[in-house]
Image (cartoon, rainbow, N blue to C red):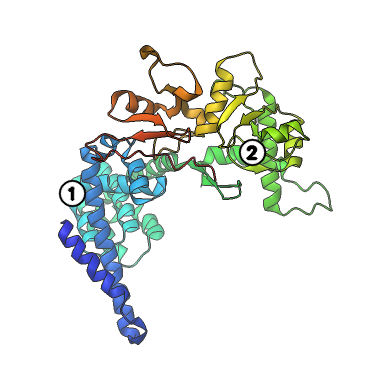
Amino acid sequence: MVEELAQAEAAVADCLGAPVWALPEQDLVAALDAAHRLAQRLAAVQLVLVRELDGRGTARTQGASSTAVWLRDRLRLSIPAARRLVDLAGALDAGTSGVGAALASGAITVEQARVISDTVRTVHTAAGAEAAEKAVGVLVEWAGQFEPALLRKLGSRVLDHVAPEVADAAARAALDTEARRADRDRHVTLSELRDGRLRLSGNLDAEAAGLLRAALDPLTAPSGPDDPRSPGQRRHDALADLCRLALRTGELPEHGGEPAQIVVTTSFDVLTRQLDAGTLDTGPRVTSEAVRRLACDAAILPAVLDGSGQTLDVGRQRRLVTGPLRRALVLRDRGCAFPGCDRPPRWCDAHHIRHWADGGSTSLANSVLLCAHHHRHLHHGDWTVRLGGDGHPEFVPPAWLDPDRLPRRNQYHRRT
């Protein structure tokens, strides 16, 4: 298969250099149709490979917590896209063969295959295998005329065509399936932009959407007739107000064993002069005005760094030995330090590089932040961790994964 795919890749590469400007319009349309069919057929091959890799447990063998996480790093996908790929691969493998065959022939698209697979699963539950096989034929035929969203709507009544005696009961089952899908797909994504801002996106289920609207709407009204803010800016400010209100309640869970707080990092020279710009423990730089504003209702904990950015001392807010060390680890590692992991500090444990039982000390030089999965993986696997020459953790893979055993580092938490 690898050789055949290489030949196909070479053929596609030849097409990229073709002078398409010289083609008549009819040939251009035909070429577009052929490229589209080929993309779907390649997608079918990819799904077969993903299903086999998932079944073998390759992801966990190589240190990832799931196949979706492994695909994110391997193929540079988003986690939602990787999950959809794994889910569809499993559905096509477990479902009727007609859906996979239609995708492999280029007759339907990946999104249509997902819709048909979901619908056929509901039909199978409601009316059995024979009705499900009939539904595949009907839906594949409809897919030649309708895009995925409309195909899903039509599919909700496909039992009227293949098993009318159970159609009403199946409609109720379809509604239940949609509710489960909404529950499964709920998520909020925070994407860090280069200047420290965050892009907020996601899907809320009906209950969470109602709660958010109920909380935001009273805070989004214009402050007066001269309020210059746009509706989007008012919603932004309302969300910030909600966060401030939540922090003031004192009822939030502890964050890494300590109350929710802001850590501002500055140089020693700045500490000896007037308060100036600083860096939050999450990475972004903030202006001196923002630092002073935060200082009005939050404790500012000075963390003194040397010239290479290594933590020398962290100011104490409480008389606890673990508090300053925990903050120093967060400042250095910024999250799970295992390569490819994006878990934030609040989900991480402090791991002893040299185990406590072997005489290792509880110190910054002997500690590394790891999420629960990678903490277990490091204790029970063949990976080793050490601090590099710059004082940051690096992980040495086992020889069976990398014969050269080249050290790897986490790229998700790098400071820019």
Gap between marks 1 and 2 measured at Cα: 63 Å
Q: Foreground residue, 97 or 258?
A: 258
Which image quadrant is residue 341 in? top left
Indicate left or right for 381 with 182 as reference.
left
Residue 115 against residue 289 in the figure, above or below: below
Q: Nearer the viewer, residue 199 or 269?
A: 269
| Picture layout, residue 250 above or below residue 319 | below
Above or below — where is 346 with respect to 72?
Answer: above
Give the residue type at disc 1: Glu
- With 208 as the anchor, is 74 left or right in this view? left
Measured as percent of width and height from the top left, residue 210 is found at 59, 40
Name the residue: 77% across, 34% down.
Answer: 273
**Label placed on residue 316:** none
Specify the label residue 279 is tagged with.
Answer: 2
The residue beneath circle 1 is 130
Residue 135 picture location, percent across and down? 25, 54
Residue under the point 24% across and 56% down:
44
Sequence-first tag of 1 and 2:
1
How far across and how far down the image is residue 383, in percent? Answer: 31, 30
Q: Is residue 68 visible?
A: yes
Amino acid on which disc 2 is placed: Thr
